[in-house]
Image (cartoon, rainbow, N blue to C red):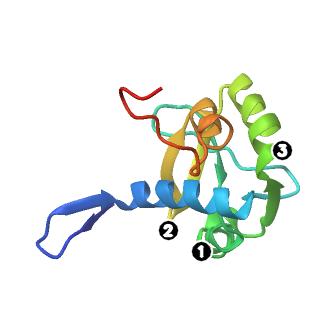
Amino acid sequence: MEALDQDGGTVMSLSGAHRAAFRREVAREGRVFSIRDPEGMPAPAGDDGRRAVPFWSKATRAGRVVDQVAAYRGFEVLAVDVDEWARGWLPRLEQDGMLVGVNWSGARATGYDLAPAQVRQWFVEAPSEDAELELPGRG
C-alpha cells in the first residue's frame, strides 16, 4: 500500500510509514506490544516461508489488529519493556530463525518483516539523538 502526495506521486508506502512510526514511538514509549492467546504468540509464515512474530509500538495498534483481524480475535495484548525485548527477545528470535513484524496493520495484518538484528540496532546500537555530529576535518 502506498500513500500519494497531492500530485499523485508516491510519498512512502503505508508499511514504510508504520515502520518509521515504530522506531519513533518505541523509543519514546520505552515498550513494545505483541499479542498472545493460550497457545502463545502468533508467528505466521510470509511469502518466503519465514515466520515473523508481530510487534507494535502502541497498545492501541495491537488492539486494533485483535479487533479487526479474524485470525487474532481472542488474543490479548502483551507489553514488553524495550530493553528486555532488545536484549532478550530479539536475540532469541534471531537464534530461532524468526523475523520481527513491525506495526502490522490492515484487514490481513501485514507490514514489514525484518531481521531481529536490524531492529535491535535501532534501539541498542543507534547513536543518541542528542549526540554531537562529527564534522569532517574536526577533531
Label 2 element class? loop
Residue identified by numbered label 3: 84
Mark 2 / mark 1, whichever is N-terminal: 1
Question: Residue at coordinates 78% horizontally, 65% vertically from top-left?
Answer: 77
Q: Position of residue 72 (x, y in %)?
A: 68, 63
Is there a contact, CB below 8 Å, between mark 1 and mark 3? no
Q: Position of residue 53 (x, y in %)?
A: 67, 45
Quadrant including the N terminus: bottom left
Mark 1 / mark 3, whichever is N-terminal: 1
Relative to the observer, which residue lies in front, 50 or 62? 62
Is there a contact, CB below 8 Å, between mark 2 and mark 1? yes
Name the amino acid, label 2: Ala
Disc ID at residue 80: none
Disc ID at residue 68: 1
Name the amino acid, label 3: Glu
Residue identified by numbered label 2: 107
- How busy is the neighbourhood of tag 3: few (under 14 within 10 Å), some, or many (20 plus)? few
- Name the mark nearer the viewer: 1 or 3: 3
> How many dots with numbers?
3
Label 1 element class? helix
Establish if 90 lies above or below 108: above
Q: CA distance from mark 2 to mark 1?
A: 7 Å
Q: CA distance from mark 1 to mark 3?
A: 29 Å
- How busy is the neighbourhood of tag 1: few (under 14 within 10 Å), some, or many (20 plus)? some
Mark 2 / mark 3, whichever is N-terminal: 3
Name the amino acid, label 1: Gln
Question: Residue at coordinates 71% horizontally, 49% vertically from top-left?
Answer: 42
Give left or right: position of 87 versus 134. right
Write down the quadrant of residue 125 in the picture: top right
Give left or right: position of 134 versus 128. left
Question: Residue at coordinates 31% horizontally, 58% vertically from top-left?
Answer: 12
Label 3 element class? helix
